[in-house]
Amino acid sequence: MEFIDTHTHLFAEEFYQDRNEVLERALKAKVTRMLLPNIDSSSIQALKDTVAISPEHFIPMMGLHPSSVKEDYINELELIEKELFSQYPYKGVGEIGIDLYWDKSTLEIQKKAFVKQCEWAVELDLAVSMHTREANREVLDCLKSMNVMPKGVFHCFSGTIEEAKEVIELGFKLGIGGVVSFKNSNLPELLKEIPLDRIVLETDSPYLAPMPYRGKRNESSYIPFIAEKLSDIYNVSIEQIAIQTSTNAMDVFNL
């Protein structure tokens, strides 16, 4: 049995002091592969340094996070493009998308940056890891406007059942993390209408730790707590959750 954490920022400064121990705990929890989505040009070196610790377990992605799309976004995109099209073994384009929680004024340039990176993903046959905070509709509309849509994951999915069904009808997976364990989450009811073969596991660490660690630093070793909650929702064994979600992740990211 193995788990795959499809979205974790283990290169972040929150892990500078104990990254090796975090990896050891993840492996002990049978989380054997962790996909690392980039943020912007300032995080590239930290991302690569983390992958160098254990390339077997840390799997890199490259992208420009929507919250980093500012006036200089074209320069940022040029740096991201150079990295993505290099010989470095990136396995996805991320973290990309649209975020309307922090700044609605940049919506138009966020759209441009998102679509451009999706086009690169199609060209390179890579999956996208999409950030869609308060922007499911905007992201879906951008995807539908493309001649060829990429494959990928709606990371940290939150939305309506109608949006969830639209996402999976377009062929995308839903990234499910610690929020599913929160008492006020609508995800347990929503997931009862979503097939398990459309789900991948993620932590988004250091953020959004599942119960019983809510409010503390998240890490990949907490994936089994998310899987346990999904085991209850789908009424299958945790082993079956591990097998199916790992198969889903390997399929979408070509692992």
Image (tube, grey):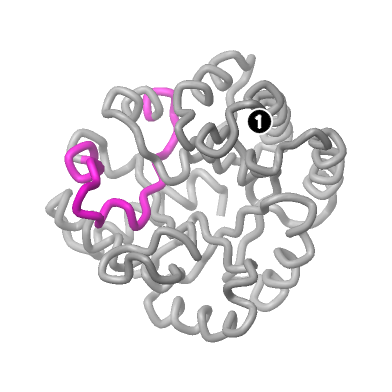
Of the 4 image quadrants, the one containing the C terminus is bottom right
Q: Is residue 154 above or below residue 91?
A: above
Q: Total label count?
A: 1
Residue at 32 percent of width and 42 percent of height: 197
**Viewer-nearest residue: 94 or 196:** 94
Percent x, y of residue 125 = 66, 37
Horizontal side of residue 11 vs 78, given as left or right? left
The answer to which image quadrant residue 191 occupies is top left
Horizontal side of residue 41 vs 56, given as left or right? right
Of the 4 image quadrants, the one containing the N terminus is bottom left
Residue at 32 percent of width and 63 percent of height: 210
Percent x, y of residue 166 = 37, 22
Horizontal side of residue 59 vs 201, given as left or right? right
**Viewer-nearest residue: 43 or 235:** 43
Please, what is the three-letter code of the amino acid marked with disc 1?
Answer: Phe
Percent x, y of residue 4 = 45, 61
Task: Look at mark 1 in the image and give the residue it sits on.
Answer: 114
Residue at 16 percent of width and 50 percent of height: 233
Percent x, y of residue 200 = 39, 49
Q: Which residues are magenta?
A: 168-191
Horizontal side of residue 129 vs 39, given as left or right? left
Query: Mark 1: few, some, or many residues within 10 Å (few <14, many ≥20)?
Result: many
Residue at 44 percent of width and 82 percent of height: 25
Does 124 lie within the magenta span? no
Element type where label 1 sits in the image: helix
